[in-house]
Amino acid sequence: MEMIVDALSDDITRVHLVGRLDILGAEKIDLKFSALCGSRRKIIVDLSEVSFLASMGMRTILIGAKAAGANGGKIALLKPAPEVEEVLTIANINTIIPLVHDLEAAIGAVSS
Amino acid sequence: MQEKLVVSAKLVEFARVCNWIKALALRSVLPQSTLFAIQLCCEEALSNIARYGFAHGDASSREVQLSVEQAGDLIILTIKDRGMAFNPLGVPPPPKPATVEEASAGGWGIQLIRKFARSQAYERRDGVNCLTLCFGIDC
């Protein structure tokens, strides 16, 4: 699991997660993902290259969302693959964190 | 196809399980969606066993046996362990969270197993927890 960060604009950060967000993948990025989310106001988490997601990976995403919220920030989840989206939906993550399929919608979600 | 793997109930073994399933899937030409479902259910089931199944007891008894066989268009995965009696299918889902602050990613594993496996069965026999999951190959 890799985490690649780029600035979309002055105040919007995109975090690409690449690979498997399984137990080991989650462990690898836990701390830095949480630290990043807690230090930015608008974070778009690009899930398009996440090939696997289970509970521990969802925990990482949630911890990031909580860190962002505690800092007055927002996150949105962008373009999960169908099975990844299904995992997020079963755990009702999509009801508390915006889950969108295009960048414009993601920008809108973190800016509202 | 009938394959077995024995691992210890530790998180470090998860990569081995994941690779084993991937190799099986390649040999049997399983669809990506079936591979995803099996790996997900394995991770969730093993997480429960590793975290709760062996609160006490020596390391040698912390073995988990996984076996996979194909029956027509179904893949049958069986997970056996000698941990404390625990029927994962009896666990109700956590309440639906209203906000990020009150949400927890814990507790959803069983729901994920219910949704991603076509059928699930549990029995406890002779001190062994036995969880059987079936996956469709055409899913």
Image (cartoon, coloured by chain):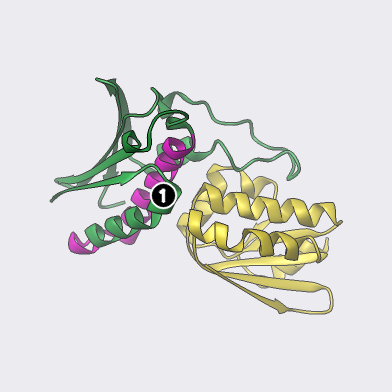
Colour assigned to chain B in the rendering is: green
Q: What element carries label 1?
A: helix
Q: Is residue B35 magenta?
A: yes
Front one among B126 and A111: B126
Q: Is residue B118 above or below residue A29?
A: above
Image quadrant where residue B65 sits = top left
Q: Is residue B2 above or below residue B125?
A: below
Image point (54%, 30%), residue name = B93
Dot 1 crowding, Cα within 10 Å, few <14, some 14–19, many 20+: many
Q: Identify the subunit bearing mark 1.
A: B
Magenta stretch, residue numbers: B26-51
Who's yellow, chain-wise?
A
Dominant secondary structure (helix, strand or loop) of the stretch shown in magenta: helix
Image point (83%, 52%), residue name = A70
Q: Does the magenta stretch include residue B13?
A: no
Residue B58 seen in the current view: yes
Q: Name the residue under label 1.
A: B40
Front one among A74 and B18: B18
Residue A99 is situated, as x and y percent measured from the top left of the image, at 64, 57
